[in-house]
Image (cartoon, helix red, strand yellow):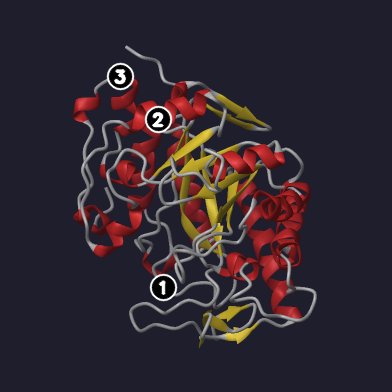
């Protein structure tokens, strides 16, 4: 039986993983009034028991009244929510698992279930889309308080016992809205014509988080080129622009770059086979996580359109080849682990015929 690179240990700072498989963050609004439940703890516990190397939780929002568009997205503040997350951590650790929260502010986003926060949604320039207003432009005080909220969440994550944390800087949410020139049109120090100028907000968050957790606690940053507002968007159109984007974030304190793309095998730039995570590792010299349509025959956006997917039986060889070439260090898996908690063990044991496709109904259940 072939032994895949996936099952080699990974160690970085204080993060010691039994394998290279990461559970991707998948937010589905099962936290009633923002409080993680016993069922949520059991959901993550099942993945830890089945030897997922690192679990990254669903997005969990910082202490800002407008950080979420849905009452049932989990919070990462307040005694009740933090006690809920402590139960999650304890359940995962009891099964010898490792876990990191994904810390999040959604920025200006459409509301769900006809609910709106007490204060307007907030973003760099008050824009929901490049041509649509949807909230308020953040003031200097708003920005400072938001940076402080991320730092406080990070402090609590370490205090509770999480093994790492991830900052959500992707997919058109708040941090990413500052990166993107079409939504960040500010003329002050938080905006600018270059990506390095527009990265200041993210850099200050990373610095504040690093100060809160200390030097050896690993900070992951999730990034994407595409946005939910524009799937064809690109922050960095060339390797040079990507250096301008990633190097200051690395210097600020990011340890691991989680590089979201729709299909992990697709190259990021012409004349190179490296994907996004491959370029992040090459540029920064730091570990990276790749992700995108692992094990299934369609990308995750189809799941939100109500589509189901079959197993892509050829994914392992391509994934193993890229990891063997040291293109990236870790691979994040979403829908396959959502469908089947035992996905990792089936691959480890060589039971590939038992792998399952993805049913659209799985998004509606916590299993």
Q: Residue at x 76, y 67 (%)?
A: 197
In the picture, the quarter occupied by the N terminus is top left
Question: Which secondary structure lies at badge 2?
Answer: helix
Q: Which quadrant of the structure image shows residue 34?
A: bottom left
Q: CA distance from mark 2 to mark 3?
A: 19 Å
**Foreground label between 3 and 1:** 3
Q: Nearer the viewer, residue 131 or 259?
A: 131
Left or right: residue 306 versus residue 234 is: left
Pointer 2 local density, CA inside 10 Å: few below 14, some 14–19, many at least 20? few
Q: Which quadrant of the structure image shows residue 205?
A: bottom right
Determine whether 326 is above or below 56 in the image: above
Left or right: residue 280 versus residue 273 is: right
Q: Residue at x 59, y 76 (%)?
A: 183
Residue bearing the label numbered 2: 318
Q: Position of residue 361 (x, y in %)?
A: 19, 56
The answer to whether the residue labelled 1 contacts the one labelled 2, judged by CB atoms less than 8 Å apart, is: no
Q: Position of residue 10 (x, y in %)?
A: 56, 27
Q: Residue at x 31, y 42 (%)?
A: 336
Residue 349: numbered disc: 3
Residue 153: numbered disc: none
**Foreground label between 2 and 3:** 2
Q: CA distance from mark 3 to mark 1?
A: 41 Å
| Lower position in the chain sequence, tag 1 or tag 2 | 1
Q: Residue at x 72, y 83 (%)?
A: 139
Question: Which secondary structure lies at badge 1?
Answer: loop
Residue bearing the label numbered 1: 71
Res. 217 visible in picture: no
Q: Nearer the viewer, residue 273 or 82?
A: 273
Left or right: residue 133 versus residue 236 is: left
């Amino acid at each position: 039986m072939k032994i895949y690179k996936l099952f080699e240990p990974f160690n970085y700072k204080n993060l010691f993983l039994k394998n290279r498989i990461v559970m991707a963050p998948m937010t589905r609004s099962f936290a009633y009034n923002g409080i993680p439940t016993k069922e949520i703890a059991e959901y993550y516990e099942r993945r830890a028991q089945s030897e997922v190397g690192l679990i990254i939780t669903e997005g969990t929002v910082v202490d800002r009244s407008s950080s979420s568009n849905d009452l049932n997205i989990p919070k990462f503040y307040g005694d009740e929510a933090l006690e809920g997350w402590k139960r999650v951590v304890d359940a995962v650790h009891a099964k010898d698992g490792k876990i990191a929260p994904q810390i999040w502010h959604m920025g200006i986003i459409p509301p769900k279930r006809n609910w709106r926060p007490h204060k307007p949604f907030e973003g760099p320039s008050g824009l929901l889309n490049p041509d649509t207003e949807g909230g308020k432009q953040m003031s200097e005080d708003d920005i400072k308080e938001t940076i402080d909220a991320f730092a406080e969440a990070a402090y609590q994550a370490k205090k509770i016992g999480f093994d790492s944390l991830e900052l959500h800087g992707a997919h058109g949410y708040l941090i990413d809205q500052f990166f993107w020139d079409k939504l960040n049109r500010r003329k002050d120090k938080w905006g600018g014509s270059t990506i390095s100028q527009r990265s200041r907000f993210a850099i200050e968050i990373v610095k504040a988080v690093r100060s809160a957790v200390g030097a050896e606690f690993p900070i992951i940053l999730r990034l994407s080129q595409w946005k939910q507002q524009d799937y064809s968007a690109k922050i960095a159109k060339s390797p040079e622009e990507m250096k301008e984007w990633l190097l200051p974030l690395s210097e600020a304190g990011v340890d691991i770059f989680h590089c979201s793309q729709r299909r992990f095998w697709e190259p990021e730039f012409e004349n190179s086979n490296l994907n996004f995570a491959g370029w992040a590792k090459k540029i920064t010299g730091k570990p990276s996580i790749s992700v995108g349509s692992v094990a299934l025959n369609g990308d995750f956006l189809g799941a939100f359109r109500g589509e189901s997917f079959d197993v892509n039986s050829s994914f392992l060889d391509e994934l193993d080849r890229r990891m063997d070439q040291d293109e990236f260090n870790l691979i994040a898996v979403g829908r396959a682990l959502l469908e089947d908690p035992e996905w990792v063990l089936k691959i480890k044991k060589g039971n590939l015929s038992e792998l399952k496709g993805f049913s659209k109904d799985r998004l509606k259940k916590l299993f």
